[in-house]
Amino acid sequence: MSIFSGLEAFGVNTKKQQNIYDNGEAEREKELLEQKKKEEAEKAARKPTFTEEKDYLLQKDITCTVCGKKFKTFVVRNAKLRRSEPDYDLRPRFHNIDTLKYHVTSCPHCGYTALTEYFTGLTKGQIQLVRENIGRSFKSQDTLLPETYDYTTAIMRTKLALYNAVVKRGKTSERAYTCLKTYWLYRDHIQEVKEAGYSDFLEIDRLTTEMRDFAKEAYEGFQKAMAEEPLPICGMDSNTLEYLLACLGTEIKDYTHAARFLSDVITSKTTNSRLKDRALELKDKVLEEVNAAKNQV
Ligand SMILES: [Zn+2]
């Protein structure tokens, strides 16, 4: 109860004066605080909002390693990204944008294309191979960038990166990694097609077969890379790589080997608890699928 309660009967507004010894400081402080809050809200409203894929993209000038011509490419504004939980097979996820669609750099003049991290650093021999096998017959592409890439475009660009990796005799891990990203892109493309209510089941079947082909190539490629190349491979240590192989093995129904990779991950002393939890979860899924397959026979 206020010390001045009852004085309302005299028509006096005592609400602002709750303290006998206060000369209005508390009220001014309150006003200042409210003013500050209002200014902050106005400032936040003036800031651009990042809600659409195009908001996260910038265009950057690049000089082609192979033909020396300039072109523009998309760069993702990493500082603006908000990470979400990755998929079960570690496919990265961010709010409002699928960054995977922008992982490829492609020269529209000569066709030299690679996952961005592999775009530079070619040897003279590799430049020659790309020029002879791709540049000579390549049909120049539009140099103007669209607002964003759709999955069909992103998949084609990643496939072109894979073809370049084969032509330039890139490392096995580069080829496998490019296959992995193509597989991931197909998966979202199929999801998008299904969500749009597309009822051409033959088309969905065709896309699913193509997706599995890339999963299979990534599966074989990473196993080959593990035998040939030092760790880390594409930023992955042995536990992460074996877990990824278990995921890919499950996708192509190679359950025996997938289970073996999983047990390596689960029993390894160096596996972190998050990865171990994921591996245990996948092990249950593998067992379920094996039992379901047995019951079908
Ligand atoms: Zn070029």
Image (tube, rainbow, N blue to C red):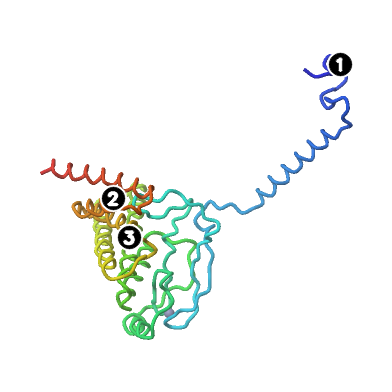
Question: Where 58 sits versus 45, above or below?
Answer: below
Q: Are marks 2 and 1 in contact (CB under 8 Å)?
A: no
Quadrant in which residue 206 is drawn: bottom left
Looking at the image, is mark 3 or mark 2 nearer the viewer?
2
Quadrant of the image occupied by residue 237: bottom left
- Asked whether 204 or 250 is in front, the reply is 250
Q: Secondary structure at mark 3?
A: helix
Q: CA distance from mark 2 to mark 1?
A: 77 Å
Looking at marks 1 and 3 on the same chain, the residue that comes earlier in the sequence is marked by: 1
User: In the rendered image, which residue does mark 2 sit on?
Assistant: 267
Q: Is mark 3 within 8 Å of ligand 1?
A: no
Task: Decide which of 276, 19 is in the foreground and name it.
Answer: 276
- Disc 1 residue type (three-letter): Leu
Mark 1 neighbour class, 10 Å CA radius: few under 14, some 14 to 19, many 20 or more: few
Local SS, label 1: helix
**Residue at horizontal 35%, vertical 63%?**
155
User: Which of labels 2 and 1 is toward the front?
Assistant: 2
Tell me the distance, in whole angstroms, between the alpha carbons under discs 3 and 2.
13 Å
In three-dimensional space, the C-alpha distance between marks 1 and 3, rounded to whole angstroms, equals: 78 Å
Label 3: how many Cα within 10 Å (few below 14, some 14–19, many 20+): some
Image quadrant occupied by the C terminus: top left
Residue depicted at 37% across the width and 54% down the height: 90
Question: Is 47 displayed left or right of 23 in the figure?
Answer: left
Q: Nearer the viewer, mark 1 or mark 3?
A: 3
Whether residues under marks 3 and 2 lie with C-beta atoms below 8 angstroms apart, the answer is no
- Residue for badge 3: 238
Left or right: where does residue 39 sit relative to residue 28? left
The residue at 82%/33% (across/down) is 26
From the viewer's perspective, is residue 100 above or below residue 66?
above
**Residue pictured at 16% horizontal, 45% vertical:** 293
Write down the residue under mark 1: 7
Residue most toward the front?
A: 269
